[in-house]
Amino acid sequence: MLLTAKAQVTVEVTLPQNNFLPGESLVAGVRITNRSGQKLHLGAEEDWLRFDVESKDGSVVAKVSEPEVVGEFDLDSMRVATKRVDLAPHFNVSQLGRYSITATVKIKAWDRELASSPRPFDIIHGAKLWEQDFGVPRSETATGVPEVRKYILEQANYLKGQLRMYLRVTDGSGGRTFRVFPIGQMISFSRPEAQVDKSCNLHVFYANGPHSFSYNVFNPDGDLTARDTYEFTASRPRLRVDDEGQISVTGGARRGTASLESAANPAPLAAPNKPKP
């Protein structure tokens, strides 16, 4: 019966990339394909979807907490659904090296558990490009020493021949990471401009193509609050700080504002669709 169940329902783990920095979101997609000829009801039990992470040597990675996987749904026969979960807060994968994720789906109606094949990934080192300490803004009535944090820009080889820039927000010592945000792909000769405004927001401007530039603004928690695209025209665009400490882009031509939601948030449960033959 178990071999028959595996043939009728398959489970696969997908990742948006193969390499991650320590502390970066690790959003795993669990792709469930139903070819059983009957509708499946999933998500009613708390433990219907379980994750396990192993290191390269086969040792089990410590689980900090159970990933919260909520939401019941029906999966018709000959349909596919994907559930996405950020595993980074729940597993201790801060050390550099190779790991693998396995997902197990419990089908209560069949009294069966189906496991995926292990999906490998690597935790890699990022090269520091720039850093600056800043004080976290607070109310005027607050007392005591202000909290100090640090903005750090890093670059890493996302794929062969491709560089990606990241923002890391840490405490003042750099020992505790609050957020790692993948800003985007950059070209090898790009030298990013970074400025912190009077509200302690970080403005990052860098070349993401031969004639295109990306402008990003982050708050002290590392949340992306603005993103624009500029092109080189009669003059090269660059950051400008006025007499009041306001930061903007001067020169070039603004080509549009990117969606913050798609850049900052993982995708929800995908609508069921037909599996590939």
Image: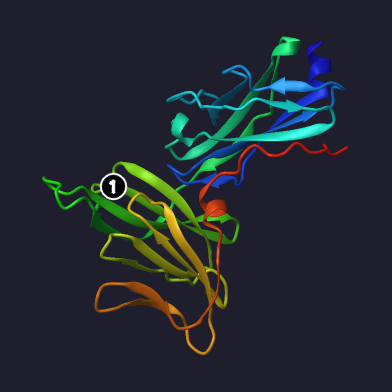
Image quadrant holding the C terminus, namely top right
The answer to whether one can see residue 44 in this image is yes
Identity of the residue drawn at 68% across and 35% down: 82
- Across and down, in percent, residue 132 comes to 28, 59
Report whether 224 appears left or right of 272. Answer: left
Q: Which residue is mark 1?
A: 174
Colour scheme in the image?
A: rainbow
Residue 90 or 76: which is nearer the viewer?
76
Residue 4 or 39: which is nearer the viewer?
39
- Across and down, in percent, residue 269 comes to 64, 37
Residue type at numbered disc 1: Gly
Residue 30 or 268: which is nearer the viewer?
268
Q: Judge whether 54 appears above or below 207 on screen.
A: above
Image quadrant holding the N terminus, namely top right
The answer to whether one can see residue 57 in this image is no
Q: Which residue is outermost to the front? A: 141
Report whether 229 appears left or right of 11. Answer: left
